[in-house]
Image (cartoon, rainbow, N blue to C red):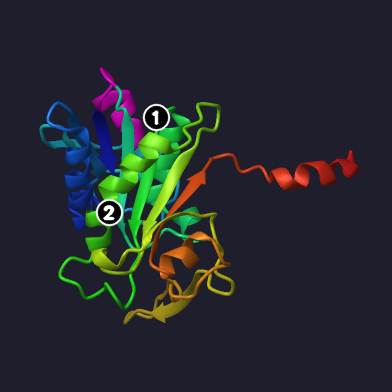
């Protein structure tokens, strides 16, 4: 198997090292793992692409490239330049440091890379590690992802739905905020929503008197509705959420015909 890995935390991120190990085991001795990842952290850029400016690509060693661009840029660079002679069979994005459950998925560059791969017709999975009181101080904070990443991906490859239509399916996987031995299993879950927990801004003033704004997050330990991704994560389960890039609110199409 020929696998492309990327992320949004940057090419030197520890989560990418975790994913490298998972991908190498999945690819097997006759397979290949290619890394094309952002040169610097790109968290929160979503599905952004560098449409108005070029991106520099630096080959660090064989099959390892750093791109001065977004995670989606990295996928484009790999598919249309770096790996143009033979496309990957699978794109894996992550392992993100922090969860991409619920509304976080909308902002996530990790998810954005998987989305771009799906739009390009390549099977893709985004993987993220939830943090909480039970795992944030572990020697290996990626323990749950490291121990269960390979089996989760393999189950998706063996039994997942891989639609090849215009807006193909990709998967958003979140590992729970617990040690590896305490992971209870896997749950297929819809995307949740943390009410009253969105992003905001906090103004600060520099010593020179200039005003700046820091984007603020919110506590991540509030469960979403039962059966949704963040809820099952906080119960100790790996969440698997099928996604599409199609943003149409299909449930509203029929009622909206009244305006025609």
Q: Is residue 157 magenta?
A: no
Crowding at mark 1 (Cα within 10 Å: few <14, some 14-19, many 20+): many
Q: Is residue 36 visible?
A: yes
CB contact under 8 Å: marks 1 and 2: no
Quadrant assignment, res 137: bottom left
Q: Position of residue 146 (x, y in %)?
A: 22, 55
Q: Position of residue 24 (x, y in %)?
A: 17, 39
Does 57 appear above or below 203? Answer: above
Residue linked to disc 1:
122
- The foreground one among 102 and 25 is 25
Which quarter of the rendered picture does the C terminus lie within? top right
Q: Is residue 53 visible?
A: no
Q: Is residue 78 magenta?
A: yes
- The foreground one among 178 and 249 is 178
Does 185 appear above or below 82? Answer: below
Q: Sequence order check: which comes first, mark 1 or mark 2? A: 1
Dot 2 lies on which element? Answer: helix
Tell me the chief SS of the magenta region: helix
Query: Which segment did they paint magenta?
Result: 74-86
Which quarter of the rendered picture does the N terminus lie within? top left
Residue occupying image coordinates x 10% and y 32%: 62
Does 69 appear above or below 1? Answer: below
Say the numbered circle drawn on residue 148: 2
């Amino acid at each position: 198997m020929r696998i492309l890995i990327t992320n949004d935390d940057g090419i030197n991120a520890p989560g990418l090292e975790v994913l490298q190990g998972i991908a190498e085991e999945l690819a097997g001795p006759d397979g290949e793992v290619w890394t094309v990842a952002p040169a610097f952290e790109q968290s929160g850029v979503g599905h952004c692409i560098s449409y108005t400016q070029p991106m520099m690509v630096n080959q660090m060693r064989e099959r390892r490239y750093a791109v001065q661009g977004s995670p989606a840029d990295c996928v484009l660079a790999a598919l249309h330049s770096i790996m143009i002679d033979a496309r990957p069979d699978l794109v894996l994005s992550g392992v993100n440091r922090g969860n991409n459950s619920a509304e976080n998925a909308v902002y996530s560059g990790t998810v954005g890379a998987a989305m771009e791969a799906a739009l390009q017709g390549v099977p893709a999975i985004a993987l993220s590690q939830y943090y909480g009181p039970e795992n944030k101080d572990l020697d290996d904070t990626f323990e749950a992802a490291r121990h269960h990443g390979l089996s989760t991906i393999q189950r998706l490859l063996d039994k997942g739905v891989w639609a090849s239509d215009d807006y193909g399916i990709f998967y958003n996987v979140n590992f729970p905020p617990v040690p590896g031995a305490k992971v209870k299993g896997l749950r297929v879950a819809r995307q949740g929503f943390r009410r009253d927990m969105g992003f905001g801004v906090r103004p600060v003033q520099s010593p020179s008197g200039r005003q700046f704004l820091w984007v603020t997050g919110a506590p991540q330990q509030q469960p979403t509705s039962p059966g949704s991704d963040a809820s099952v994560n906080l119960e100790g389960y790996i969440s698997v959420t099928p996604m599409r890039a199609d943003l149409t609110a299909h449930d509203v199409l029929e009622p909206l015909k009244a305006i025609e």
